[in-house]
Image: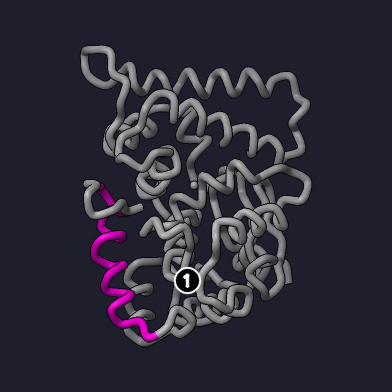
Amino acid sequence: MARHSPSHLNLDPMSRSQSSSSIRSNLTIDSSRSTTSSQKRRGLLGKLGTGVQSIFRRFSRSRTTLTEMQIQILLAMTNFTREEVVKWHEDFITNYPNGYMTRKQFVSMYKSLCPKSDPERFARHIFRAFDLDRSNTVDFHEFLVGLSMTSTTSSIRDKLQWIFHVFDIDGNGILTRRECLEIIEIFVRFNQSLQGDTSNPNNDQLIIAAKRSMMNIFDNVGDIHNDKLTMSQFVEGCLKDDLISQLLEPGSATTLTNTHDNSTAST
């Protein structure tokens, strides 16, 4: 199977088409950190934010250069090949010469990729998962980790661990019912806007069903009324709910995928 290629990434929710060489045209949207030292995070993103982030920066001379050590770290952290890492870095620095993407630039990227929808709310929440160190910027290493985590080759469990940080609006490592209700509606509405299906009267019913499923996850944790979810409870609950799994799995609105296989097959 062909590996991911930076020059063929696409963010279309229903189909994959060949893209150009720059980051803005490389990406499309298919259908979402570690905390400060005083906060305790568990799971994959917690480890990334504490260990790898410090190692990556230790060996970094500049946010615009890519050392051999950094390449090796990214190879271990992502599903990209060496050639893909180098190519993605070239494209990233071309588009963001300072070596990082601000929140505004991140949102602008989504807007340019989805001109017929309004992705601002969605993109602002997805940004939170990309921004591992909570610096309000996304550097190349964070960007590539995010791409890898949202690719169709990542497992649904790993993807849900990553998406947990999208739902965790206040960044305290615990999800509330209010946070989950807000984010799941944003997911569904954005997916609908990408499909050009915003006027469908059934859309509201899908939102209601998705919210009900999210509340069932809370209700099914333990024997008493529960208003909070840990990462493990969130992941396990989503895996047991067919609707939520379908909304959040690779192929949904959150997924950043490449189209190397499809584009090469069509040529």
Specify the farthest residue to the top.
224
Q: Quadrant of residue 118?
A: top right
Residues in magenta, as a range: 41-61
| Up/down of 55 relative to 197, above or below | below
In this rendering, would 208 be left or right of 14? Answer: left
Q: How is the image coloured?
A: one colour
Q: Residue at x 74, y 19 (%)?
A: 201
Count up the numbered dots.
1
Indicate the quadrant containing the C terminus: top left, top right, bottom left or bottom right: bottom right
Q: Residue at x 49, y 39 (%)?
A: 248
Residue 57 is one of the magenta-drawn residues: yes
Residue 169 is one of the magenta-drawn residues: no
78 and 109: which one is in front? Answer: 109
The image position of residue 104, as x and y in percent, is 60, 57
Q: To which residue does mark 1 refer?
A: 140
Mark 1 residue crowding within 10 angstroms, few (<14) / some (14–19) / many (20+) = many
Task: Examine the residues drawn in magenta and state their main secondary structure.
Answer: helix
The image position of residue 156, as x and y in percent, is 40, 45
The image position of residue 166, as x and y in percent, is 45, 43
Residue type beneath disc 1 = Phe
Q: Quadrant of residue 258?
A: bottom right
In this rendering, would 242 be left or right of 38? Answer: right
In this rendering, would 134 be left or right of 150? Answer: left
Q: Residue at x 61, y 68 (%)?
A: 260
63 and 116: which one is in front? Answer: 63
Label 1 element class? helix
Q: Residue at x 27, y 70 (%)?
A: 54
The image position of residue 241, as x and y in percent, is 41, 27
